[in-house]
Amino acid sequence: MIKKIAWLGTLAIATLVLACGTALYAQAGGATNTLTGVVTDMACGKSHSLMKGNGTNAQCVRTCVKGGSAFGLVVGGKVIELRGDSQELDKYAAQRVTVRGAMQGKDFQVESVRPAK
């Protein structure tokens, strides 16, 4: 009888751990997916008005990132913060790309980036 109770207790704990792990995975995004949009920086977002005609959007993105801003991706009307290989993202500043990765909270962890078709 005691072994049966211990076994049921172990099963209950394992089920609870699995359920919590699944909930955290879903909350963090976890699942790999793709997003297509334009590479920007989080300081300027959709508008690169800080350059005031003194450079291209790509130069603005690079200047802001060098100044401490994170890379972002303009998808529709939203700007999503990108986390990943900064050198790779820099190659595509102000260009339309497809990124593959996973949402982690409000950020998108980039696994790969390529020009959008």
Image: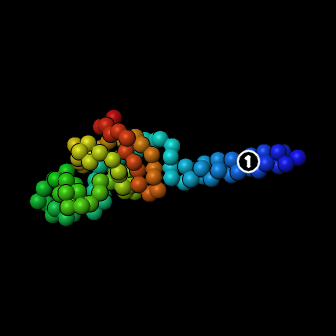
The picture places residue 2, in percent across and down from the top left corner, at: 85, 48
Residue at the right extreme of this rendering: 1
Question: Mark 1 — residue?
Answer: 10
Question: Who's the residue at 69% across and 47% down the image?
Answer: 14
At x 60%, y 48%, the residue is 22
Q: Is residue 115 above or below residue 66?
A: above
Residue 105 appears at what percent x and percent y? 47, 56
Farthest top residue in view: 117
For the question of whether residue 61 can be seen, the reply is yes
Between 18 and 105, which is closer to the camera in this rendering? 18
Q: How crowded is mark 1: few (under 14 residues within 10 Å), some or many (20 or more)?
A: few
Residue drawn where x is 16% and y is 62% of the image? 51
- Helix or strand or loop: what does disc 1 sit on? helix
The answer to whether residue 115 is left or right of residue 3 is: left
Q: Is residue 16 above or below residue 117?
A: below
- Quarter occupied by residue 63: bottom left
Along the line of sight, the residue nearer the viewer: 90 or 54: 90
Residue 91 quadrant: top left
